[in-house]
Image (spheres, coloured by chain):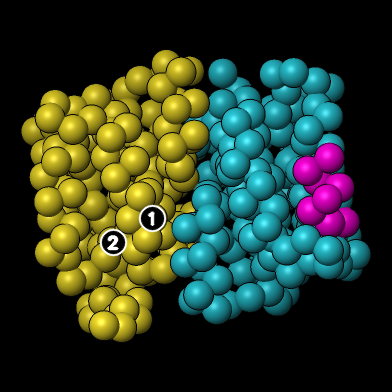
Amino acid sequence: MRNAPYSELNPTPHPLIYFVDDDPIDRQLYQKSFQRTFPNHDIELFSSGFEMMAATSQATRLPMLIFLDVKMPLMDGFETLMSLKADRKWSAVPVIMLTVSREPQELKLCYQLGAQSWVTKPESQEAMEQLMGLILSYWDTAARTPYTT
Amino acid sequence: MTYNNVIFTADDDEDDRLLLKQAFDQQSPECQLVFFTDGDELLSALMNLPFGELPRLIILDLNMPRMSGFEVLKRLKAHPRLRIIPVVVMTTSNRAEDVALSYQSGSSSFVTKPTSYDRLLELVKVTRQYWFETVTVFSEL
């Protein structure tokens, strides 16, 4: 069986972004920020790494970026990151760790496991929108990813 | 020397090295670029850094003589101390296969070399904003 080319996996024009976070308030913050400020991006929210990994096997469309929390029940950010990077197709999706932690050993481990970036999670919606604006100005205009559209 | 503002860059094309230096000097003079003409030179310099010191970022060309960017990436990501340095692949290649393979090999992002100086200035601006002001890397902790 041949592998489907990347273009066949992405039939829609809007970039898709995954957010994986166990905190419902933070998930709501991501959703509101994107609805208000970045309506030309589609987002999917997951409450755990376990839920997201279960969805990857069914996905017909791969995300441009994955924002991943570190501390989560069932399957934390480290284990989720390892699972993503062990999969040939999903290992090409950039993963940005989005977390309140500034623990050097956690940061180091995430980079060792193949995370593309580590970003500190802001607390207000305004700060979140500002942060997402900075992040997307890089990933939308400068960097290329395999699954941009 | 403080390495937190240092970017190691490997590119065999002299013109591209000069343009990148000019663009950073103009747009982000606080960033200190250290240039290498191939992957061997880059890896040797990284291996010989003082203990605990790492550049904030590596900008890596793909098509270089002796050792390709992919081979450099593979060696960097297999090295216990060096694997935590973010690597931005910057190349003339626009091939989807190179984009995917770069990420699969452990690059932090993939950027196509701009065709005009104005676009290069814009790229330098967003690169500095992202990698120096938005993202936390190990070298700054």
Percent of width and height locating residue A9: 26, 76
Residues in magenta, as a range: B37-44
At label 2, the amino acid type is Pro
Real-space Cα distance between discs 2 and 1? 11 Å
At label 1, the amino acid type is Ser
Is residue B6 located in the magenta-colored stretch of the structure? no
Q: From the image, state the color of chain A.
A: yellow
- Residue drawn at 64 percent across, 60 percent down: B70
Prevalent SS, magenta region: helix
Q: Quadrant of residue B98?
A: bottom right
The quadrant the N terminus of chain B occupies is top right
Residue that mark 1 sits on: A91
Q: Quadrant of residue B22?
A: bottom right
Above or below, comparing residue B60 to residue B52 in the picture: below
Would you say A88 lies left or right of B38 here?
Answer: left
The quadrant the C terminus of chain B occupies is top right
Which one is earlier in the sequence, the residue at label 2 or at label 1? 2
The disc placed on residue A63 is 2
Asked which secondary structure carries label 2, the reply is loop
* Chain of the residue under label 2: A
Above or below, comparing residue A5 to residue B80 in the picture: below
Percent of width and height locating residue B2: 77, 22
Percent of width and height locating residue A8: 28, 83
Binning the other alpha carbons within 10 Å of mark 1 as few (below 14), some (14 to 19) or many (20 upward) gives: many
